[in-house]
Amino acid sequence: MDNNILAVEGIDRHLGTIESLGFQRDAKRNGRKRTVDFNQGIDARFIVRNPELAAALGRIAIDPIRLAFDFLSPAIERDYRKAITLLAEQGFLEFTTYMLYNYNDTPEDFYRRLQINAQLSRELDIRVSGFPMRYIPITGTKRDHVSPKWKWRWLRGIQCVLHATHGLVSPKPSFIAAAFGEDIEDFYRILAMPDRYIVYREHYKHNGADDWWREYRQLSASEQHEFLDLLARLNGNHRRKEIIAGLGRFRSLVEHYYPNGNVPPRSPGEEET
């Protein structure tokens, strides 16, 4: 079967079969609610082309309903918004959207998709949560792929945020602002921070992170990119201490990431021992 479930030939008939087998909406068996789960993200474009699919999905016991929001363009955003609106009209209130990143997108695209989920949740009185998924080439044997429009540090920063949020991104504006930043500039600031400053934001807010930010923000845009490239080279490098010891520029900034050239403590508790 096609991983893009709505692209399967005769999908209307298949959905009808699922319904007829006792998996209609609110169906129960032996007192337990029956559910249908299409683990893949539903392609919004097929729902927009054939709105009857939204009605057909609404007639079966699908829970949860998952959509794909892997890219961002005016056409994709339009179809995504329309598909969720059509599904909401069928009574769906809780959505999870798979959000591919580190592919052909940019960090700005990623942040914009979070904002779109928040807008839809507010406008339609529903909940559209994001589930970011980092792209790794199918031939990749390591998780080290960095697409041309991303930096290793930015990807690491998102990983740290998702560690704190358990992988799911709430559509509440206050949550997005706290986790990913109040705007795109704040988003980039958070992604550039040392791991522990991200994960334990409140603890380090006035205990290192403020000093880091005062110094980092003094760098020009080109200097920031140069510094982020340096962090990528230091990651996993067996000569890290030697390289850091020989640094002229960026030495004090690097100290926030590798105190005395060492791997940083993973938590405030480890730092205090």
Image (cartoon, helix red, strand yellow):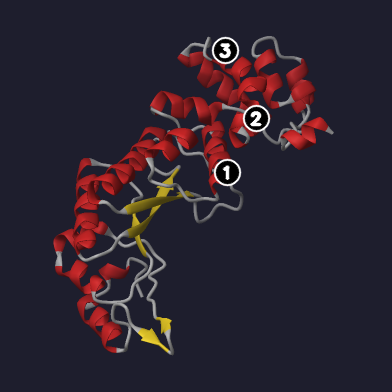
Amino acid type, mark 3: Arg
Residue 243's disc number: none
Residue 164's disc number: 1
User: Which percent across, then down, holds residue 241?
Assistant: 78, 24
Q: CA distance from mark 2 to mark 3?
A: 17 Å
Q: Nearer the viewer, residue 70 or 84?
A: 84
Amino acid type, mark 2: His
Q: Are marks 2 and 1 in contact (CB under 8 Å)?
A: no
| 196 vs 226: above or below | below
Q: Quadrant of the C terminus?
A: top right
| 249 vs 147: above or below | above
User: Which percent across, then down, holds residue 233?
Assistant: 64, 29
User: Which percent across, then down, holds residue 232?
Assistant: 61, 30
Q: Nearer the viewer, residue 127 or 154?
A: 127
**Label whose residue precedes the other's in the sequence (3 or 1):** 1
**Can see residue 24?**
yes
Q: Residues within 10 Å of mark 2 (few under 14, many from 20)?
A: some
**Label whose residue precedes the other's in the sequence (2 or 1):** 1
Secondary element at image label 3 = helix
Secondary element at image label 2 = helix
Residue 214's disc number: 3
| 201 vs 207: above or below | below
Q: CA distance from mark 3 to mark 1?
A: 24 Å
Q: Residues within 10 Å of mark 1 (few under 14, many from 20)?
A: some
**Can see residue 105?**
no
Residue 203's disc number: 2
Amino acid type, mark 1: Ala
Which image quadrant for residue 258? top right
| 132 vs 49: above or below | above
Q: CA distance from mark 2 to mark 1?
A: 14 Å
Secondary element at image label 1 = helix
